[in-house]
Image (cartoon, rainbow, N blue to C red):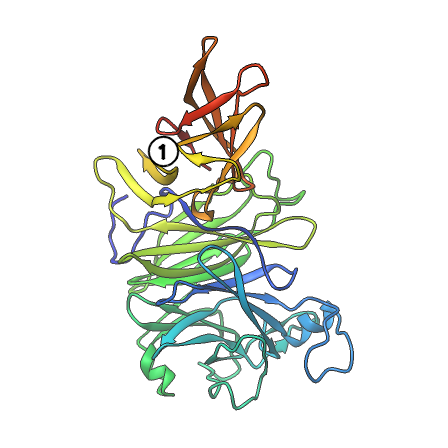
Amino acid sequence: MSVSVEGQIDIAGPVGKLLHRRPLKNATVMQSFGVEPVTGEIFVIQVAEGGLTLAGESGPVSYADRAAHGDLCVTRLTQAGAITGHMYLRGFGHGVSMGVENRDGVTRLWTETASKPTQDGKTGFGTAVTHFEFRSGTVLDHGSSLHSTPYTPAAGATGVTCTIDPTTNRLIVRFGSNGMHFESYDLAKAAAGVWEPIARIAQPDPNGTFQGYASLGGVVYLLAGQAIAEDNPANPFPGNTYLTAVDWATGAVLDQRLVLAGPGLVYREPEGMAVSIRDGVPHLHFGFACENPAPRTCTIMSLSAAPEIDGVKVLTDWQPLTLAAGVTADQNAPKGRLISIAGIETLQLSGGVKGTFDIERVIGTLPDSLTPSMAASASVPRNNRAGRCVARAEASPDRQLRLFGGSGDNVITWAQLDSFSAVWR
């Protein structure tokens, strides 16, 4: 792909991963997410689940009432996918998009608010944007003094949401007013209550059900599609998820592509986009809500702006693997990385293991960034016994790395992973 606009990433290029099938505080579908620019923590928004009784409520509230009122749940996760906090927002909207800001060491969230239900009364959507400090374990109501004065970009605007471009420090607001539009603002000024639009473009056709957006430099990206279902089958793959790149300067579509990432995910509903800067490199993220039936989980994919060198692009640099009980490192501790070779995502492993492997064994756990949605396997050398000197290692969607080939009469005592190189999806 020839890049014509600053911030343009090849949306047909190799895809890595940020989170893999992680549970959230509530069992409902992830709607959007954001990445804390300093800590790297991930914040995910979903409509609050039914049956909860929150502070100030006399009894459990149904999911239908939560959705209509615009009640949301925010989950905070580490980069490893562990839940470390949550917060409820009442009367805010549907959670279509969000921004995460670190201001003087304090995490602040930017979201829609002032929810109003759609004409059928079933779903609430924001009519303004606001920001507030993330305070785990609390409930924040629309109209509270704990969030900033709401801002509406146009009289009578609907579906008002926002996100942050960390590469330009701009706040992006999407809203409906005689069609859908995007407007950009200086983040610091907006935080101070000074709203001066920098640019405004109309939203082009996202080629499907709109599910999220993000801004990176001179490009705004759109996500569209539906969950895997009878009218959107996984077999034959790949469903109907699309990414679209739009020029901020002209509003013209730069590129639009069918998304092939995550073919093994169950349910696979596209939900949310965000931009982060990791090790100085911008990454464009898009999410999938997974599992059917609920509880849903959260998977976040990544497109990296890192350069390709001699046909190789590093998507995730070397990460250590956590060894299973009874397994020890043989000389070099096992680790893995995800690279693209000529556009093909490839999982590479290194190091070795020792133990007593007389049956199929889990030998380690993969980090989310290396976990495939479909099993990836390769032959690896092992101790030679009775002419058998090769075993099979398999990286699975359950995050486990398994070793096959050992038996009671032919025990594997060591295996080297340096030759492991397999297509990753």
Q: Is residue 333 left or right of residue 322?
A: left
Query: Label 1: which residue?
Result: 351
Q: Residue furthest right?
A: 59
- State whether residue 396 is above or below residue 121: above
Q: Amino acid at mark 1?
A: Gly
Q: Residue furthest left?
A: 310
Q: Residue at x 37, y 38 (%)?
A: 333
- State whether residue 50 is above or below residue 127: above
The residue nearer to you, when weighing 67 against 266, is: 266
Element assignment for label 1: loop
Q: Residue at x 51, y 39 (%)?
A: 324
Q: Residue furthest bottom?
A: 145
Q: Residue at x 40, y 62 (%)?
A: 214
Residue 321 appears at what percent x and percent y? 43, 42
Q: Residue at x 57, y 14 (%)?
A: 409
* Quarter location, residue 27: bottom right
Residue 377 appears at what percent x and percent y? 47, 28
On-image quarter of the N terminus: top left
Circle 1 crowding by C-alpha within 10 Å: few under 14, some 14–19, many from 20: many
Q: Determine if residue 303 is in view.
A: yes
Q: Total marks drawn?
A: 1
Residue 230 appears at what percent x and percent y? 67, 42
Residue 174 appears at what percent x and percent y? 45, 71
* Quarter location, residue 334: top left
Q: Is residue 126 left or right of residue 110?
A: right
Q: Determine if residue 206 is in view.
A: no
- State whether residue 299 is above or below residue 313: below
Q: Is residue 68 left or right of residue 269?
A: right
